[in-house]
Amino acid sequence: MRAFIQNYLEAEKARREENGEKGFSLIELIVVVVILGVLVAIAIPVFGSIQATAEENATKAVAASAATQWTAQLANNETVTAYKTGDAKITLQGQPATGAAINSVCAEATYDRATDYVAKSGPGC
């Protein structure tokens, strides 16, 4: 089948060159559209998994950063302040009270989407 299509395309190209025609034949355009369709069909699921992985990694990073900030503030006997996530879709819980034990710190970050992803970080988790 492949050889048939290739021979047909070569014959059509030779015929067009003889007659002085320029441009692409309908079959050539259909082949290009099919190839593009296959590439798009492969790319969309890959992009979806990349986006989900990025959301999970962002959630893990927020939990780890908050736990680090709170642990450092407790270690320095400072007032424990709220951690700002910088992302409206990530909610953070678990802020310890000022003066709490360092080993009780557990930051829990949740990424809000259809299936919530939860990441925990800290010595108390």
Image (cartoon, grey):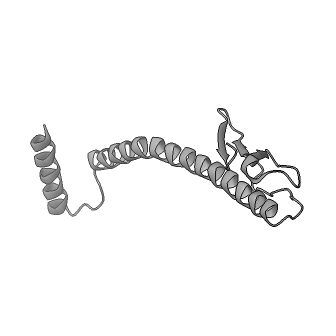
In the displayed structure, 73 sits above or below 97; it is below
In the displayed structure, 19 sits above or below 34; it is below
Q: Quadrant of residue 118?
A: top right
Residue shown at 83% from the left, 49% from the top: 96
Q: Position of residue 81 (x, y in %)?
A: 87, 59
Q: Position of residue 18 (x, y in %)?
A: 14, 61
Q: Quadrant of the N terminus?
A: top left
Q: Quadrant of the C terminus?
A: top right
Q: Is residue 89 something one can see in this rendering? A: no
Residue sticking out furthest to the bottom: 76
Q: Is residue 88 left or right of residue 54?
A: right
Q: Is residue 110 something one can see in this rendering? A: yes
Q: Position of residue 89 (x, y in %)?
A: 74, 46
Foreground pick, 123 / 50: 123
Residue shown at 85% from the left, 64% from the top: 77
Q: Is residue 29 left or right of residue 11?
A: right
Q: Position of residue 90 (x, y in %)?
A: 74, 47
Foreground pick, 26 / 72: 72
Residue shown at 69% from the left, 58% from the top: 65
Residue shown at 87% from the left, 55% from the top: 99
Foreground pick, 89 / 83: 83
Q: Quadrant of residue 24?
A: bottom left
